[in-house]
Image: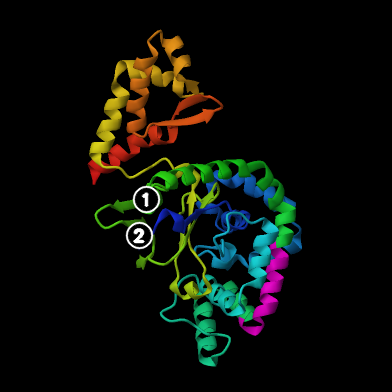
């Protein structure tokens, strides 16, 4: 089942790319709540568990429906600001209109979208329906739902206090040591946006996306079915180290009245897998197969090189090197940066690595 975005009228200027410490912390909380989905993190999760007090662990478990399968929208970027610190993101959650906070909480606690909006703050019948849905899902959801219905603002205050404590105890130091990878991916996706369309960029974030160029539509394979018109909406793309194998998509129309953007949180390890046509893949393979160009690529794998560096190393003229570099660039296999008066080049390894996957994907469809 797919979530399909119609991006016909969505310009790259409507798309923001930003790291989010809050969203990444929720990804960590999800991994703790669903360790069977993230076996590669088992050692790290054990270390985190050892750092928590018994009280912090109990509080985390009581809120765990918020970051289980259906992630809590309030803990993802609520605006399109270029950057917010963790304290600023937490303050934004605290300042979110209570009605919106409660709607988001209701969805997360029941673990999905209901057939209609449940106004548990003002409608006793909706409140009873909500609690019944929670009861049928699990005991922990029933208990958490009852806490929300009893006093929504107190629910928010206790949650915020937990998030701050968990951040200071378990997450903050890990963020400081690991956020550089996320910031690098932010720069890469921004680069793609500056030279491409919103649809091609959103399709490039994961091999689970499907791009339909004739209609500027992008589909993500999810356990949901939805068609979302992106016209007039803002998008925020959030890189994550921890969310793999999930791509988290939040698009709900009922929040648009609060000027809350659509979210796509994607694993950075999947970034290189771009949906390309079989002809584009054939061209890239042909460009790489040229023997002289292949020898050139060996020098472009591990470091940036100037044209003169490559000319000297390969004992060929600079004009010939430039022609090879142009072929690589036209095939989107080369990145170039300016360093003072020099221009340095390097192979785009994420794209090269993805060729095999994309080739198999195209021929088995």
Q: Nearer the viewer, residue 312 or 355?
A: 312
Q: Nearer the viewer, residue 18 or 54?
A: 18
Q: Which residues, given as a range, are shown in magenta?
A: 149-163
Position in image of residue 167 (x %, y %): 70, 56
Q: Residues within 10 Å of mark 2 (few under 14, many from 20)?
A: many
Q: Is residue 154 magenta?
A: yes
Q: Which residue corresponds to mark 1?
A: 197
Residue at x 68%, y 66% (from the top left corner): 91
Q: Earlier in the sequence, mark 1 or mark 2?
A: 2
Quarter that holds the N terminus: bottom left
Going by the image, does 101 lie left or right of 236? right
Mark linked to residue 7? 2
Position in image of residue 84 (x %, y %): 64, 56
Mark 1–mark 2 CB contact (< 8 Å) = yes
Mark linked to residue 207? none
Residue at x 49%, y 83% (from the top left corner): 118
């Amino acid at each position: 089942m797919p979530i399909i975005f119609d991006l016909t009228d969505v310009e790259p200027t409507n798309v923001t790319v930003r790291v989010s410490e809050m969203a990444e912390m929720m990804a960590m909380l999800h991994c703790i709540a669903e360790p069977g989905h993230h076996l590669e993190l088992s050692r790290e999760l054990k270390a985190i568990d050892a750092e928590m007090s018994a009280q912090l662990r109990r509080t985390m478990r009581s809120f765990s429906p918020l970051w289980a399968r259906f992630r809590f929208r309030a803990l993802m970027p609520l605006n399109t600001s270029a950057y917010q610190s963790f304290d600023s993101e937490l303050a934004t959650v605290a300042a979110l209109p209570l009605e919106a906070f409660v709607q988001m909480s209701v969805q997360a606690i029941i673990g999905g979208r209901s057939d209609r909006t449940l106004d548990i703050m003002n409608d006793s019948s909706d409140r009873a329906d909500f609690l019944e849905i929670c009861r049928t899902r699990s005991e922990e959801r029933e208990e958490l739902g009852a806490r929300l219905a009893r006093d929504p603002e107190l629910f928010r205050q206790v949650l915020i206090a937990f998030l701050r404590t968990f951040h200071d105890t378990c997450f903050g130091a890990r963020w400081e040591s690991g956020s550089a990878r996320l910031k690098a991916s932010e720069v890469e996706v921004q680069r793609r946006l500056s030279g491409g369309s919103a649809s091609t960029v959103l399709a490039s974030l994961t091999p689970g996306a499907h791009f339909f160029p004739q209609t500027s539509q992008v589909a993500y394979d999810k356990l949901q079915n939805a068609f979302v018109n992106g016209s007039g909406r803002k998008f925020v793309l959030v890189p994550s180290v921890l969310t793999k194998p999930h791509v988290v998509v939040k698009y709900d129309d009922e929040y648009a009245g609060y000027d809350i953007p659509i979210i796509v949180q994607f694993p950075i390890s999947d970034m290189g897998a771009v949906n390309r046509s079989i002809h584009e893949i054939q061209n890239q393979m042909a460009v790489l197969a040229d023997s002289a160009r292949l020898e050139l690529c060996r020098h472009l794998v591990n470091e940036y090189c100037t044209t003169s560096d490559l000319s000297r190393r390969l004992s060929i003229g600079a004009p010939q090197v430039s022609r090879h570099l142009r072929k690589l660039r036209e095939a989107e296999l080369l990145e170039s940066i300016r360093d003072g008066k020099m221009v340095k080049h390097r192979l785009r390894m994420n794209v090269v690595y993805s060729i095999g996957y994309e080739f198999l994907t195209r021929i088995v469809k």
